[in-house]
Image (cartoon, rainbow, N blue to C red):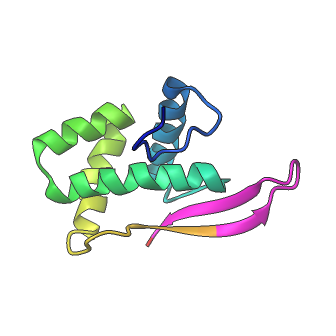
Amino acid sequence: MRHRNKVPKLSMDRSRRRSVLAGQAKALIVHGKVDTTTARAEATQQVVERLVTWARRGDQAGQRRAFAILQDKEATAKLFTEIGERYRDRDGGYTRLLKLGPRRGDGAEIARLTWV
């Protein structure tokens, strides 16, 4: 049963979905934008918003939680030093989702996830 589970399944099992979302979150932190399908972008947006909230607090427990998701020391360091400081005074809504239209190959709706 899916009671109270907010993240869409994205036609993947749990381990693959976590890996894909963590990879996209890491790419957004490192490169500043991610182009993907709309469903994946919305799911990634939820993960990234939570990571930035932990980074705003700046405590060690938040760093450990973020590293458990990202599995990358450089991305975690950038999240807590640059991105967490940039959004220190913002209460939420750290990312923006721009719809780009259908993908040429299969017609899937594409969206770009960027920082506000």
Given residues 55 and 4, the one toward you in this image is 4
In-image side of 9 versus 109 (left or right): left
Quadrant where the C terminus lies? bottom left
Q: Residue at x 20, y 35 (%)?
A: 64
Residue 111, relative to residue 29: is it above or below? below
What secondary structure predominates along the stretch shown in magenta? strand
- Residue 32: image location, x then y, percent: 49, 59
Residue 8 in the image: state x and y as whole percent.
Answer: 54, 44
Is residue 2 at least partly visible in the picture?
A: yes
- Residue at the image position 31 percent from the left and 69 percent from the top: 92
Residue 97 in which image quadrant: bottom right
Does residue 72 appear in this view? no
Rendered view: 98 above or below 106: below
Q: Is residue 111 magenta?
A: yes
Q: Residue at x 49, y 50 (%)?
A: 44
Q: Which x, y percent locates residue 17? A: 53, 33
- Please provide the residue range marked out in magenta: 99-115
Which residue is at the front of the view, 1 or 82? Answer: 1
